[in-house]
Amino acid sequence: MSRPGAFLHLGVEIDVAARTITCRYRLDDDDFAEVAHLPEGDLTAPGVAAAAEIYALLAGVSYYKTRAPSRIDLGPFTTTPAQAAFLRRYYVAGLGEFALKNDLDLRDIELVGPHADAPPAAGPGDVGRLLIPFGGGLDSTVTVAELADQADDAALFVVERPGARFEAIERPAAATGLPVLRVERQLDPKVLTSAERGYLNGHVPITGVLSALAVVTAAATGRGAVVMSNEHSASSATTDGPFGPVNHQWSKGLEFEQGFRSLVNQRVGAVTYFSWLRDRTELSIAESFASLTEFHHLFRSCNRAFHQDPSRRLDRWCGECDKCLFIDLALAPHMTPDQLSAIFDGDEPLIRPSMRPQLETLLGFGGTRPFECVGDEAECRQALLLAAARPDRAGATELQELASLLPPVPPEPPLVPTASIPDRYAPPARLD
């Protein structure tokens, strides 16, 4: 398809009185404005303006994709060549799934704008005060349980649409006992009517946008670290497309984390960004979660709990999607069938015959892996073998049959330790 025109960044405005940040863009004849409302913190604090610029640079992806032109103009925003290269990569790789589903080759994107180098807007912040983005699922619950008590002060971070609250987040958040800092993100109404306007549609690297808003909030509230809950396998490609690997979780992966952390360090300075779970597998995280019994009846990772239409939102696990199936699979080596049956309302997806085709895909027996936040093939195979070896799964016919088809999974080599965790939190084994 033709991809004319250019996507133009028009700038970002901070309204201290209204407590809003407005990002403005233009594409052909359409102007877009996205507004974030931040009820907490000092929007004049050092580093906030620089963090708001990063938010504007990353949030633009939601509007660029309406037509996906080959040219992106950063307008008033200056970058170093390395920062510009990261931003271009954010569009090309972060929109990989979108490009695949729309049959686009984004490798010709030209990102232009003035180059300039400047020192960070603020000095190092207090890493004893943490901000932890929280989604109510397994991973972020483990991060809170392991890390919050080590901090001088910790708070959860939640982004929501105006007036939208999700019980799947609110209930486990309340159980942590931590304060919740919120941002309301209002997309330009035009992108909410994409089909009627003839816009292209598809997945965006949303974790990048949420990460940028978390950095803004941390700078405004004097918190020196934003702690993500992204694990090792988030860096694995979901599939191979005609123009290279495609990763549904790219903005949760190591490449994004490293590039974004460098961008924040160079431009903001007051906030460090890292993932507590980066050198952990899904199985090790699930093992940790298995001991957090107070959250077993509260946590939710099923996407149907977060449907924007309240009438279509489930207050339970759907038990039918790939995410439900994978969570059950990851926990099965570490929890009893009765425990997992209670979580899934008496109908565990892992042992339901109708779910076998989806399970076989997760195990790598064929088909395209789902565009969901699930573990990679090796993790899924290891989880199934460990679950099938449990005495209380001896009568699970489907599991035993699938386990017999799998070769033994060799012991995993040690994951490369991460040096991104601040020294005060990282045991020696997790530092380079």
Image (cartoon, rainbow, N blue to C red):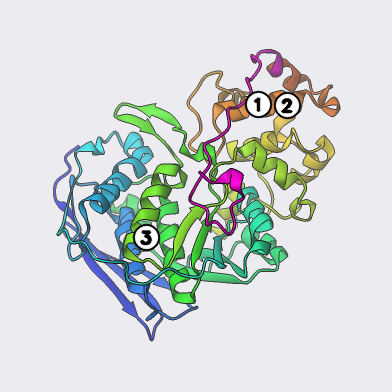
Check the image and report above or below for 160 versus 397: below
**Does the magenta stretch mainly form a helix, a strand or a loop?**
loop
Q: Amino acid at mark 1?
A: Gln
Q: Secondary structure at mark 1?
A: helix
Q: CA distance from mark 3 to mark 1?
A: 37 Å
User: Do the residues bearing badges 3 and 1 touch, measured as CB atoms within 8 Å?
Assistant: no
Would you say residue 358 is visible in this rendering? Answer: no
Residue placed most toward the observer, 280 or 212? 280
Q: Mark 2 against mark 3, which lies toward the viewer?
A: 3
Q: CA distance from mark 2 to mark 3?
A: 40 Å
User: Do the residues bearing badges 1 and 2 touch, measured as CB atoms within 8 Å?
Assistant: yes
Q: CA distance from mark 1 to mark 2?
A: 6 Å
Residue drawn 44% across and 71% down?
A: 219
Would you say residue 247 is visible in this rendering? Answer: yes
Q: Secondary structure at mark 3?
A: helix
Q: Which residues are magenta?
A: 403-432
Residue drawn 74% across and 34% down?
A: 332
Q: Name the residue tied to disc 2.
A: 386
Is residue 416 rendered magenta in the image? Answer: yes
Q: Name the residue tied to disc 1.
A: 382
Residue drawn 37% across and 76% down?
A: 46
Q: Name the residue tied to disc 3.
A: 264
Relative to 304, 175 lies left or right:
right
